[in-house]
Image: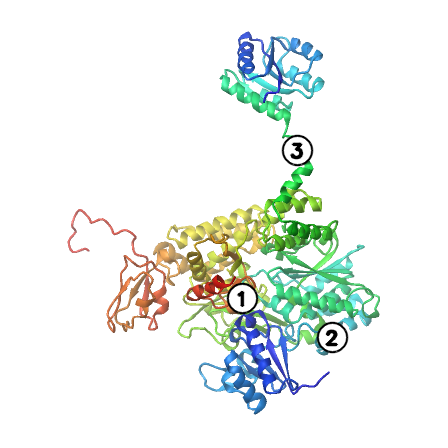
Amino acid sequence: MTDNMKILVVDDEPIVIKSCESVLRAEGYNVEGLLSAREAMLKMEKQPFDLVFTDLKMPEVDGLTLIRWIRKERPDTGIVVITGYPSQETIKEALELGIIDYVPKPFTPVALIDVAKRAVDWIKGPPAVDKEKEKEKEREELPPSMLNEIDRVIDQYKGKAGSSIPVLQRCQEIVGYLPPSVQKIVARGLGLTPADIHSIVSFYSFFTMKPRGDHNIRICLGTACYVKRVEEVLNKLMTDLKIDVGEVTEDKKFSIETVRCLGACGLAPVMVIDDETYGAVTPKKVPDILREYAVKE
Amino acid sequence: MENYRANLLLCAGTGCVASGTPKVTAALREELEKKGLSDEIKIVLTGCNGFCAEGPVMLVYPDEIFYQKITVEEVPKLVEEHFLKGRPYERLMFREPEKRAAIPLMNEIPFFKHQVLRVLRNKGLIDPESLEEYIARDGYLATAKALHEMTPEDIISVIKDAGIRGRGGAGFPTGLKWEFASKSQADQKYMLCNGDEGDPGAFMDRSVMEADPHSVIEGMIIGARAIGASKGVIYVRAEYPLAVERLQRAINLCRESGLLGNNILDSGFDFDLEIYLGAGAFVCGEETALMRSIEGQRGMPRPRPPFPAHKGLWDKPSVLNNVETLAQIAPTILNGAEWYRSLGTEKSSGTKVFALTGDIRNVGLVEVPMGIPLKTIIYDIGGGMKNKKKKFKAVQMGGPSGGCIPEDLINIPVTYEDVVKTGAIMGSGGMVVMDEDTCMVSTAKFFLEFTADESCGKCTPCRVGTRVMLDMLTDITEGRGKEGDIEILEDLSRDIIATSLCGLGQTAPNPVLSTIRYFRHEYEAHIKDHWCHAGICSDLASFHVIEEVCKGCGACLRACPQQAIVGEKKKPHRILQELCIQCRSCYDACKFASIKIEPAQPKEKPEPVAVDQGGSE
């Protein structure tokens, strides 16, 4: 785990060095200690360290000077500050110089190990990944037929300005919803970031990140339907199917969505199941309508 | 073209289709075949006729006999009587409830009698999928005139003189918009159509796109010519699949016949357009938000200026017009500004389409001259309340940006100016009629829920303000209202209106302000008396039987889901308050109005008082 990480501890108090050495060595790190910043610079000129733990207040050359020197001469070295005076000002300055973390003195062995571990992880960066493999991983979530179709849609719109919404609409038609994997594939295909795509998916109510049931029930919450008390119909639907708006029944048969207006106000209250429009729906009619679909296979 | 003895114009609008047009069509076809009439009588599926409540409806041409609520079972009789024996079939004709006599002719039915059709000139008359039928009704004549005989300045001056105002809501003069864009210099300009009808309760744009798609396209071609645009986009809601299909078909037909593309009608003018599907965001009705959406971004508005006429879609000069606005361009170019101004008032000329819905009898789409009294629309055309025993309370106009107009203002002429004076707005033309069983506080809350949900979140007054107002309204409807809440709501409303970035926020408080203005007593009753008079807010109502009126019919007893009603037949019933959940079922079930709604009962019974004051309960 520690991969023989080389750590240099710089502090004018020998006891701090001693305790750091014993704690970190026990964790498998390769640790050296020095009592002044000057010595540290001389040492580092000769050999690199992965991580430097340094005090801020030291005679002659202080910690901030050492940090500045390291950033310049050994920019790859990670820096952690140990300080008994974590004043806002000095910490802020140290942070601006790019330190990874700091440990306030006095510290417990556990705290030290914790900070060291986090700093090491930081230096190593995220685990190196095979970009191609990553791509495959998302694609594994979808059957090849859908993938081909998605690729086709992307090719068709690629390079066309403002194509993200139409592409997403088509992809939702293909997959039924827009899980993160699909969003990533679309983002990559159109040369956008997943964040760009997600910002669109989350903004427009037409897009959904949840799968729908075999039969999607859309219920209109427009004014005319409101006046005709569509809420009672919705409540009946929710109790009968035992789901809330935006959910899917256990057997995956039905899902309920609300729409702001279906533009069929003359028939209020209105609901649409798949492509079938039902007008003047009352709570009483709900079970019969659902039965039609329950038998349909 | 073959000659038919009669044409059966069957409505295939969304409403009638849901009411059974496909089945009726199949039955008619079969029956005509059986009787050997298929060569003489032609079935035409048209766009929305407008009289949605009576669907499926059919108009027989040339007799102009109107049939309604046609069922499959009645089809054989209908065919036999009308088309074999030549006797119009009375049973399926429209009847006014008070009068017994059937009204055979469409134009004599009150719903149609008061209407003047300009935008909806082709509704229910032509097959929306046929270019020839549109052309037969003077279609694309205006395009030829505009491209060959008029300069862009001529076109703009006709539209300006006519006084056409944007039918999407704000009522901005269309001619001015075009003039600004035509004067902008740019290598590319865009002509856009807003078909993202988001106003809940309005469906005229859907109807026009479905019933007469070419009228929109023609308006766009003429507009494009006026501003010098070579590209156009129609932004349509994805929830309107039929409209998209019909528009796409119409565009394809136009391309094939040289009405779209390069060198339209040999005039040297190039224009083509495409459809862009919206993805469901109310705020995209705002022009800058809609343009961002076409660019593939979140549909968030931006401050104006710069106005789209200078920097719009892709930063190029653009004009965005509403569907209904565009549909009136062609006849105006053809007939001139004077013709357009012959209807309506000085400042609100022409006609306006309204979607009549709610607790009204004749639900549907109507087109009337501007300036017509609101009362005429509701009582003469709309036929009054659906439930005759209920009183009219208010009509909501302008959707989430509008307000409620109460009964004592029902005589106002319907014009942009007069409607605004009431605190409502013309909006896109949704008219939702409410009877006395409506709770105005809940209605305001309904609209706030909508706007709070649809707020794009860009500016704080709208994002946070609408949420705070909604929370307050929720408190009021659930019995947690406090003295002073009404004043805070009014203050907040003013701040949100003054500081929001776009039309959505600037108008979001309107439903609250207008209901406070006319129904302040209802707010007060909710807050002070814990009493929702309509019984809609279940925390603020209790239901009681008026014993003197109760006939003991048992209707309420059967309707009650809680078995909270007891009583013997023909004797006054009683509601057990401990079991009642205030669902209102008994109130709706009672035919004798013997259920009264009183303030909420205290939830817990008060503790017995230690000191006996003597005599008190």
Instruction: Quickly name the residue at label 1.
Output: A277
Mark 2: amino acid: Leu
Residue drawn at 67 percent across, 51 percent down = A150
Marks 3/1 in contact by CB < 8 Å: the verdict is: no
Circle 3 sits in a helix, a strand or a loop, which is it? Answer: loop
Q: Chain of mark 3?
A: A
Mark 1: amino acid: Thr
Mark 3: amino acid: Val
Image: A239 above or below B20 = above
Crowd band around label 1 with a 10 angstrom C-alpha radius: few (<14), some (14–19), many (20+): many
Q: Quadrant of the N terminus of chain A?
A: top right
Instruction: Quickly name the residue at label 2.
Output: B334
Image: B538 above or below B212 = above
**Which is more foreground, mark 3 or mark 1?**
3
On screen, residue B135 versus residue A91, left or right, reads: right
Marks 1/2 in contact by CB < 8 Å: the verdict is: no
x%, y% of residue A91? 58, 21
Image: A14 above or below B321 = above
Q: Chain of mark 2?
A: B
Camera-side residue of B336 and B119: B119
In the rendered image, is residue B339 in sight?
Answer: yes
The part of the image, by quadrant, that contains residue B571 is: bottom left
Task: Estimate the spatial distance between the alpha carbons at disc 3 and disc 2, rounded to whole Å.
Answer: 67 Å
The part of the image, by quadrant, that contains residue B64 is: bottom right
Circle 1 sits in a helix, a strand or a loop, which is it? Answer: strand
Circle 2 sits in a helix, a strand or a loop, which is it? Answer: helix
The label number, if any, that marks residue A129 in the structure image = 3
In the rendered image, is residue B372 in sight?
Answer: no
Image: B359 above or below A166 = below
On screen, residue B99 versus residue A83, left or right, reads: left
The part of the image, by quadrant, that contains residue B27 is: bottom right
Disc on the earlier residue, 3 or 1: 3
